[in-house]
Image (cartoon, rainbow, N blue to C red):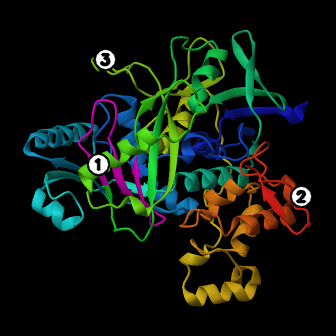
């Protein structure tokens, strides 16, 4: 059927896939974006450190280094166009003891080779002045002025919404199964919701990117090893950290980080444990203890009693060799159009600094298509701007009053900890990409993330979702089919009991 034929199919709606779809929506192309989960950004994108890296850490000459620095420079304009929170506060690599200071000098040299601007080494006294809660034993610190913090999900949903607003078709709960290949060219993508024809398929499948490329007959030696990182979130009542604090890095990890967030909390972590299961986001006692011990090296005054949440994310660690002559590095990004199959754009091993690099990866995909002979004609009506819905807690008292007068639902509070109003929730349910689950609303509005962790808001959110979507409360889910929040009415019929 003609309606099932597309110019480009993007597989995976994480931050990379969503930004690629948005970048391609600038051109006269018919584009399909598919995602196996019930929402965009629900995989690796939804659980990471939320840091926009300056670019002094990747090995010079690697794709990671090139795309990290190029991507970092795109964030200000992107945040302006897509209206999401981004704060370029800078970050610090903190040395404790004189023996760690040479590592800072090495990072400065590496950063300069990568083209990073604004790198300086400051004294221990200056670091203690800038961050009063830092370990008193700090001997020096590297300050990177271009580092920043963001909300990874906010950029993903904003990019995906902007893509949809510019004509991209998004199919959620649509899993990739295999390619249809004719005469060494991909001509269609088989999914759990049918087969869709295409001239190009873009592999942005994250943790499953190796499986997708193997279906295309590409890089049979390439594998993804999930690397689990565990985190702790501290209440806003805890001491204030204004920036991002790194320890001196190890060969496998940037270490346990203490970071401010755009939501006002402090997040600490992650660990770095390689595992086999690509779905295993379990939080472990051992892992969380490692987080806490690592944190004490940077900010020893934090109190465990202020921990309000824990979570774990998986990074898509690959084993690709850097293709720059003379550079010995085997955990590089894969960003390519392979020679052995036509119609395929292959993106794999996009681990840290993948979030920072994502805007540059999207731009590179466009350029690779042009270099491959694809005639990309710009759409005269393409609109790069996506306005966010109002956030009640961020408005002035006067603006709040005006909003309530226009829509009384903005005067009814649903989440007390984070001051999320009913009007905000309804707006997200009816947004260009509708929030149809509790977790989708949580990531968009930040409800359920405060001290009570949803104890107050959950019954109200279930009621609003059921009403707005025309569902029974029994059909409302946490994150899609199989995660229903309620199982049956109570004996009196006055409420519901939760699933154990």
Spot the residue most to the left.
Answer: 98
Which residue is located at x 14 percent, y 41 percent? 100
Residue 218 image position (x, y, % from top left): 58, 14
Nearest to the observer: residue 61 or residue 106: 106
Q: Nearer the viewer, mark 2 or mark 3?
A: 2
Write down the region rendered in magenta: 245-269
Q: CA distance from mark 2 to mark 3?
A: 58 Å
Nearest to the observer: residue 367 or residue 177: 177
Q: CA distance from mark 3 to mark 1?
A: 31 Å
The dot on residue 112 is: none
Q: Which residue is mark 1?
A: 246
The dot on residue 325 is: 3
Which residue is located at x 36 percent, y 42 percent? 290
Q: Residues within 10 Å of mark 2 (few under 14, many from 20)?
A: some
CB contact under 8 Å: marks 1 and 2: no
Q: CA distance from mark 1 to mark 2?
A: 46 Å
Residue 2 image position (x, y, % from top left): 89, 32
Q: Which residue is mark 2?
A: 471
* Secondary element at image label 2: loop
Q: Residues within 10 Å of mark 1 (few under 14, many from 20)?
A: many
| Relative to 420, residue 478 above or below | above
* Secondary element at image label 3: loop
Nearest to the observer: residue 315 or residue 176: 315
């Amino acid at each position: 059927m003609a309606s099932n034929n597309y110019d480009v199919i993007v597989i995976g709606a994480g931050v990379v896939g969503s930004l690629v779809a948005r970048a391609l929506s600038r051109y006269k192309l018919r584009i399909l974006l598919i995602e196996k989960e019930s929402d965009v950004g629900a995989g690796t994108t939804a659980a990471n450190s939320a840091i926009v890296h300056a670019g002094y850490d990747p090995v010079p000459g690697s794709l990671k280094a090139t795309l990290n620095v190029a991507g970092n420079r795109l964030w200000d304009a992107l945040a302006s166009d897509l209206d999401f929170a981004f704060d370029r506060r800078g970050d610090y690599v903190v040395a404790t003891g004189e023996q760690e200071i040479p590592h800072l000098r090495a990072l400065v040299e590496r950063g300069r080779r990568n083209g990073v601007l604004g790198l300086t080494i400051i004294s221990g006294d200056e670091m203690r002045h800038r961050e009063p809660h830092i370990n008193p034993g700090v001997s020096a610190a590297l300050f990177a002025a271009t580092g920043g913090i963001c909300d990874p999900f906010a950029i993903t949903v904003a990019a995906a919404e902007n893509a949809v607003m510019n004509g991209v078709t998004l199919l959620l709960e649509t899993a990739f199964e295999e390619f249809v290949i004719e005469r060494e060219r991909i001509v269609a993508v088989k999914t759990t919701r049918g087969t869709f024809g295409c001239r190009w398929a873009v592999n942005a499948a994250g943790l499953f990117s190796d499986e997708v490329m193997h279906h295309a007959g590409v890089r049979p030696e390439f594998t993804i090893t999930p690397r689990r990182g565990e985190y702790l979130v501290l209440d806003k009542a805890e001491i204030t950290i204004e920036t991002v604090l790194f320890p001196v890095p190890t060969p496998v990890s940037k270490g346990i980080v203490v970071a401010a967030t755009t939501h006002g909390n402090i997040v600490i972590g992650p660990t770095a444990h390689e595992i086999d299961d690509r779905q295993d986001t379990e939080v472990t006692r051992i892992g969380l203890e490692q987080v806490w011990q690592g944190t004490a090296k940077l900010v020893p005054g934090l109190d465990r009693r202020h921990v309000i949440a824990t979570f774990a994310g998986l990074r898509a660690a690959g084993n690709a060799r850097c293709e720059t002559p003379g550079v010995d590095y085997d955990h590089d990004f894969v960003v390519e159009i392979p020679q052995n199959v036509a119609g395929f754009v292959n993106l794999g091993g996009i681990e840290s600094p993948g979030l920072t690099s994502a805007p540059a990866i999207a731009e590179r995909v466009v350029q690779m298509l042009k270099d491959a002979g694809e005639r990309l004609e710009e759409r005269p009506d393409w609109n790069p701007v996506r306005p966010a819905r109002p956030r009640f807690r961020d408005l002035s008292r006067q603006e709040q009053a005006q909003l309530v007068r226009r829509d009384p639902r903005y005067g009814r509070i649903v989440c007390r900890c984070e001051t999320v109003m009913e009007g905000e929730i309804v707006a997200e349910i009816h947004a260009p990409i509708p929030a149809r689950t509790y977790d989708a609303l949580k990531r968009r509005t930040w409800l359920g993330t405060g001290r009570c962790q949803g104890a107050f808001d959950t019954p109200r959110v279930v009621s609003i979702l059921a009403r707005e979507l025309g569902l029974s409360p029994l059909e409302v889910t946490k994150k899609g089919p199989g995660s229903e929040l309620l199982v049956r009415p109570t004996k009196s019929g006055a409420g519901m009991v939760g699933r154990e």
